[in-house]
Image (cartoon, helix red, strand yellow):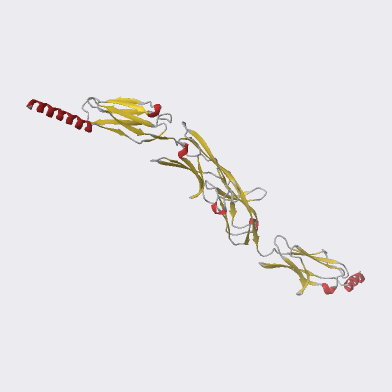
Amino acid sequence: MRGVKCISFALWINILSVMTAENDFSLELTPSNPVIHVGEDLELTCRVSGCPFNVTFIWKATLDEFLGGEIKNEQNVSRLLIRNISVKHSNKVVCKATCPMKPSGREKTANIQMFSFPEDPIVPKIKSLTANQTQKLTCTVHNIYPPERFQVEWLRGNTVLHKDRLQVEHLDHVQNYSFVYNYTPSVDDLGKNISCKATMNLSLVKQERTTTAEYGPGTITVSSNNALVKIGEPLEIACHADGNPKPTISWWKLENKPELQSHNHTLIINNASWSQAGWYQCNASNGAGSQQARIKVIVVGPPNIPRIQLSHEEEPKEGESISIFCSSDGRPAKLKLYRQSQTIATGDPDKSAVLLNITSVQTTDAGIYICEAINEFGFERSTINITVQAQEDIRSKVDLL
């Protein structure tokens, strides 16, 4: 009986030892949930503890999918290196470990999430974006996987204009996609960049790439349609253009041969002269396009000194017909022709001349005649002294002969 008891006790100790060793036998697989970009290398490590013997490792893919890779085993560690991983590889990899003298093995599964999003979105150059005019925008992304996790947003500044998601079934390859959006800018959008933002939303990783579109000047504005400046005074005219990259601005004076005036946004005339009147053009340009706007500069001031002329080169004789001509050129003015503070003729403001005809001049018509040009900025005068030869003087000269 004593011997039987000893054998039973030894057997129990042995069973307990096996059970304890079984519980100590464990396996760890790292990383267990890797997220990896297509084309990169992935190394999985399977490590066993609680087994004093050489462990037998088996790597396999679920559902008989392609595994591939290089396996390197040590006593209680096995490593699987998958080079240049692709979507053709299995997304579930199982490591199974068996320890001698152990009744059962251990296994763990790594859930691999593969994705492809290698480049920024491509947005072709846009010639212009003009308020209230519809423009077709295109955003292209290359080598995308998985498509069901991908979306594109169009933004103007920080405001989301439109979202696109791919409505496709699960694919086993990377693919290119293009997204088209018909966009009508508003006046409030001007000055804000437009961007295509692409996002890959994975369970553990979110990757974003944004491309800001290059677009040429579509809306160009100057401070007013017409600029009025008084002679001798300064004038500034600002020119602004929407575009990306920021357009360069140049000002030109439009004459027979255009002359460059400035490379700044603001055209500055420090001391306006008559020669600076005329049409000016603002040119806005960048790598995507160009745009122009014109403005007329009007220089105002007192009228030019008028001219007063008599139709006769010699002294007119009493009874002859004469004409007195008053004219002013270059600047708008109202003309008046008068003698001895009494207005004789007044010109039309739209015309630059006044004509006074005297059909039978008399000595009483002799005197100083004044031609006056007047506008809101001042006046100028010219005079002429007209004498008339009387008939008695003419007869006296004839008698003397």
Residue 66, image x and y in percent? 40, 26
Q: Considering depth in this image, is 118 or 347 the residue closer to the camera?
A: 118
Which quadrant is the C terminus positioned in? bottom right
In this orientation, which residue lies closer to the viewer: 81 or 53?
53
User: How far from the left and from the top, in percent, is residue 236?
Assistant: 57, 58
Above or below residue 43? Residue 187 is below
**Nearer the observer, 252 or 210:** 210
Say which quarter of the image contains residue 268: bottom right
Residue 265 visible here:
yes
Residue beneath the point at 33% across and 27% down: 59
Q: Left or right of 300: which side holds 188?
A: left
Q: Position of residue 211 (x, y in %)?
A: 49, 42
Q: Quadrant of residue 89?
A: top left
**213 or 20: nearer the viewer:** 20
Horizontal and vertical percent position of residue 79: 31, 28
* The furthest residue to the left: 2
